[in-house]
Amino acid sequence: MSFYTWAHTLVSKGTVVLAGVATGAALLGITGLWLVEQELVARAGESLVLAATGMADKLDAMLRERDGDIEIIAAAPQVHSDDAVLIARHLRSVQAAYPVYSRLAVTNRAGRIVASTDGNWVGQDFHQSSWFQAVRQAPRVHAETVRESGASAGQLRAVVFSAPINDTNGAFFGAIMTEVDRTTWTRLVDESINQFSARTENFGIVRYRVLSHDGALLLTFEPQDRSSLNLRDMGLPSAAKVATGRSGYVEEEHLIKHIPVVTGYARMKGVRSLPTLQWGLLVRAERTEVLVGLRSVLAKIALVGVAGFVLMLALLMWVRRSQQHEQKLAAEAARRLQDRESQLSAVVTHAVDGIISIDQAGRILSFNPAAERLFGYSADEAMGRNVSSLMPEPYQSEHDGYLEKYLRTGVAMIIGQGREVIGRRRDGSTFPMDLAVSEMTVDGQRCFTGIVRDITARKVAERTLREGEMRHRAVIEGAMDAVVLMDGEGHIIGWNRRAVEIFGWSEEEVLGRALDQTIVPPSLREAHRNGVAKYLATGVGPVLNRLIEHTAVRKDGTEFPVELTIVPLQLETGMKFSAFVRDITARKQMVEQLNERETFFRLLSDHLPIGVFEIDHRGSCLYGNRMWGSLFKLSEKSGRCCPGQSGSWLQWFHPDDREKVEGEWERTRNTFDRVAVECRLAEGGEEARWVNVLLWPMADDRGVRYLGTLEDITERKRTVAHTLTLLRHGRFELQTLTEARNLAELLAYAFPDASRAQLGLTELLVNGVEHGNLGISYAEKSALLDQGQFETELIRRSALPEHRNKRVHITVERTDRNLAMTIRDDGSGFDWKPYLDLNHERADESHGRGIGMAKAISFDQLDFQGCGNQVVVSVLLKGVDTDSWLEEERKVA
């Protein structure tokens, strides 16, 4: 019996072959459908990653805009005023120009609200608030997340931005805060999700969650989510992965519904490296909704499979029709092959990575859309080209030799291994990419398929990380204080150059050793070890984050006084500590010398033309010289220690100025810096007496005392304010921004309302330098501000030969009825019409509103002339009471 006859008999009589064929077909179909499902889920996940990344970019842009706004608002002259009504009016105008702010407020030095867009806030004490303490202790912009139920739990209530307000001497004057509430953030997120849902109609309902840096829930699409949820603590994979800072997607189970979902995640960059604003974005879709279209196709395929099985059964039962049955099977196989080819084509077409196939001569056979985007060639242009045209030299010239050598020897350099290479775009630019190459044989011909991925962003991130580490090391090595880095158990892991100089130990000698074995004196070592153990057990350390005086010991055993600050750092790798140590031996010796010369000083101070006084740490007067007594109209017989003036030295000053002096005194008690403030004396007679107060802290064995001076500046301030009212004709020229701001402050006294006029004059004079003489356009300034290069560009342009001799010219003309000022720069002018009015389209921009504000607030009339390099401003003087005007100017002064 022949093999064909035996097989035919088996097929016609048994069910074994039928079962085997059915089982094989089912396994093949299930495997193919599983692969297609995985591909669709992967594509959905990548789309959700793009949605999460886009949402994070939009929220980051919002944070950067608000971060830039707070610096501009804090620099405005109005917020430096003592007039709460003027400050409140300015805050309301800012809120009208920036509707994104739900609330704005300004505090004084003590943290009390003096003006706010929310009337209920005025007068409230915020000195214990985190945003006020942050800008008071560190003079820079601060931003933080405020939650509904506390600092560590609860959904987002608002994001608060705050900045310090400094006086003319650079001292802390107060703080300004702006608040963007939950409604604005929710609207931004909803808009992003709605736009994404409109583009991807096959995902069903797309849901989102916004997490804090520690995994707590801030914003959510889910109404059933509790405000106290911490998804990272609950073990949600996407919440854990987003904390790493990288974007991606993950398949996971819904914590409440217990159904499979696909979640894309991304993390915000935040501003000023503040971790509380590095939110995590989770965007998810239910897996069943992603695959609902595919499963409809699967049902149809299943029906077709059943029909095919019936045909196969009928064919086996009717052996005589074997030829027809074979033809039907061939047709079915061809259709399935075509379907698989279509599926493969769809995968290649929509792949994120570039996929390129070549023959053994290096000619391109296929070029998918992702490759078109990477290299800039269309598929039609790329077909038939040698793949070496996608490589820069010298790889382009050497590629054919590599391929020929592989075909001859079989030794692979890239094939089957993968590596980083350099690609070349159509425009000649190059970029780094990952390349993986596989080999196959088609119709007896060897061909190769390469998958390429652009890794430019990854390379930039790696370079940025390296540069950051180098800067960090340079700062530590260049520090004037000793910097000691320790692990969680107090063992030294870092030791800078200054530490070597102060303590005498080299870095190699101390690495790995406990701190109490090196720089802690023997008498204090037991207390040091107990403090470390207590902190590790309870998380409470009495000396952490505080500047204290301590005793240290050098390698040779000598003890010496130091100032010490220990800062705990909670990192992903565990707890670390940074100790900053300053040798204060010289300062201690100086204090001792000062004590010896105190007597001589007091004798000498009696002959000084300014008041000299000394107070203790409570503010009680210890000493006052003769000029001090003269200022307070005390007789020589009444003594030198505040007779008749009991209590604190703050009682010497006018009630309206005591809070300002008290704030400066509080600051110097915390920072040991000098106090410098102008204020009025409490008993000035009919006209207030102005004094310049300087106060220096001194520390000795008796504790902290303060030495101060009082200089009578009443006549000088009266002269400045009065002189400007005498101005009838005047000409001024300036070149730099500093000159522009100083002249604006001076000329403002010539106007009835000096504070309003100073705002407009500053804007116009600064514009004359920046946009007029230096030729910086609105678009250029926007780009430079975004890049943080604006100040650098100002310095560069000012040094160019074509700008060295350019000036801004100011002419002042006063009559009995009118005060006019003409400002002309040496630039080529600009199109000033779009900037005359406050435009809501530029409300979110960091500049471009100065002219509109000057016209609306500072002057009665503002006119640009000619090409735009000359502007004339004026105010009416009719009906102005010059006597009250002089008094107002004295108050402003």
Image: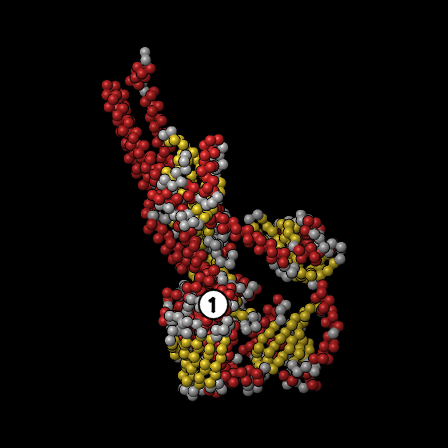
Identify the image's colour scheme: rainbow, by chain, secondary structure or one colour. Answer: secondary structure
Picture quadrant where residue 17 is located: top left
Q: Position of residue 730 (x, y in %)?
A: 48, 83
Q: What's the residue type where badge 1 is placed? A: Ile
- Residue at x 62%, y 49% (from the top left corner): 488
Whether residue 261 is situated above or below residue 527 in the rendered picture: above
Residue at the spot of label 1: 72
- In the displayed image of the protein, which residue is found farthest to the top? 1
Along the line of sight, the residue nearer the viewer: 646 or 509: 509
Residue in the picture at 50% in, 69% down: 801
Whether residue 450 is situated above or below residue 751 in the rendered picture: above
Q: Residues within 10 Å of mark 1 (few under 14, many from 20)?
A: few
Q: Is label 1 in a helix, a strand or a loop? A: helix
Q: Is residue 391 left or right of residue 170?
A: left
- Residue 406 appears anywhere in the view: yes
Residue 680 placement: quadrant = bottom right
Residue 24 sits above or below residue 419 on the image: above
How far from the left and from the top, in percent, is residue 211? Answer: 46, 52
- Residue 81: x and y, percent? 50, 75
